[in-house]
Image (cartoon, helix red, strand yellow):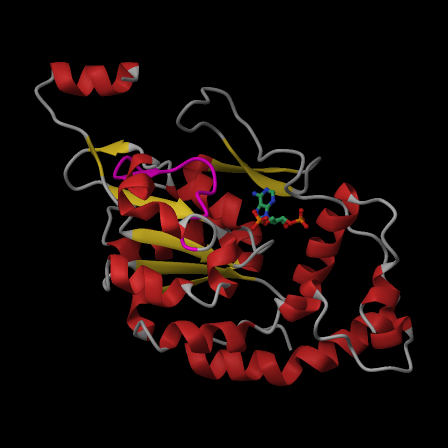
Amino acid sequence: ASPKYRFFREQGLNPEQQLPSALIIGVKKGGTRALLEFIRIHPDVRAAGSEVHFFDKHYAKGFQWYRSKMPPTLEGQITIEKSPSYFITKEAPRRVQHMNPSTKLLVVVRNPVTRAISDYTQAISKKPDMKPFERLVFLNGSEKSPIDVSWGPVKLGVYARYLARWLKYFPLSQFLFVSGERLILDPALELRRVQDFFGLKRVVTEKHFYFNSTKGFPCLFKSEGHSAPHCLGKTKGRNHPYINPVVLQRLRDFYRPYNIRFYHMTGINFGWS
Ligand code: A3P
């Protein structure tokens, strides 16, 4: 057992691993790591550190296995996990409902155009010989052709399509949509919304954040496991390549109707188009 676990035991407390009561289900490149690192500062929130991928890759291993991946918690603490692939996994809504129909679902969303570029930037960092974004984004690689909706970075940004699947299993009231843009501009505000949604005391506030102008992102003064100020790792907040503005406009036009549908579904205007 970890030293912390032993400490709890010695205090007569009985920490136990619990299945998560809240999940950050997506979206990939929306800011899911930032959200998890920020909310887990709260003493009543305990998080699995790495992505568990239970509802997509490891479902056959069963709930015992899933629980064994969770941190020990005390009564009243919320267990949370994030695997951004859940949002787009067909079976995930039914499986999560089967685990617990009152699971709270957090979705960090971001302008799908920026999200696509972020996704591409991550992909090319792993596979440097990838074709340019401006070619992959179109069918036949040509600006004269339509947008290639089957290309992952484009496809994932059609949020309405994936949300529709989740809404067959969960009421809207169980979702919290976090703005990926505001999570960068005003993390304290988004974290206040998250804490209110969980019914938690507002512990994570302005005081925890500072803006690191070198990185260009908010960073933390201190948090669990870190006594010193720190930012997220190098893979979070990458420089994006320059994209031809004509291509960007095509993408904006492509997403507009889907964005509007998403605003109607969620009742929130995210201001992307
Ligand atoms: P970029 O690296 O393209 O800028 P995810 O964790 O879901 O993969 O999302 C990664 C994105 O989180 C980053 O994409 C970045 O824009 C965003 N982000 C939000 N807050 C951040 C923060 N405080 N530090 C670094 N990246 C942050």
Q: Main secondary structure of the magenta part?
A: loop
**In front here: 176 or 95?**
95
Residue drawn at the location 24% of the way across and 20% of the way down: 5
Does residue 205 appear anywhere in the picture? no
190 versus 72 height, above or below: below
Instruction: From the viewer's perspective, tell me whether residue 199 is left or right of residue 10.
Output: right
Position of the C terminus, as image quadrant, is bottom right
Return the x and y of residue 222 as percentages of the image width and height: 45, 27
**Which residue is at the front of the view, 100 or 246?**
100
Span colored in magenta? 42-55
Q: Position of residue 196 (x, y in %)?
A: 29, 56
Above or below, 96 against 21 in this view is below
Q: Residue at x 84, y 72 (%)?
A: 247
> Is 43 inside the magenta-drawn segment?
yes
Which quadrant would residue 260 be assigned to in this image? bottom right
Q: Is residue 18 left or right of residue 148?
A: left
- Residue 1 belongs to magenta span: no
Residue 45: quadrant of the picture: top left
Direction left: furthest residue: 12
- Residue 197 in the image: x percent, y percent? 29, 58
Please count the marks in the image: 0
Residue 98 is left or right of residue 85, and the answer is: left
Q: Position of residue 189 (x, y in %)?
A: 43, 54
Does residue 271 appear anywhere in the picture?
Answer: yes
The front one of 249 and 28 is 28
Residue plotted at (22% across, 40% down): 77
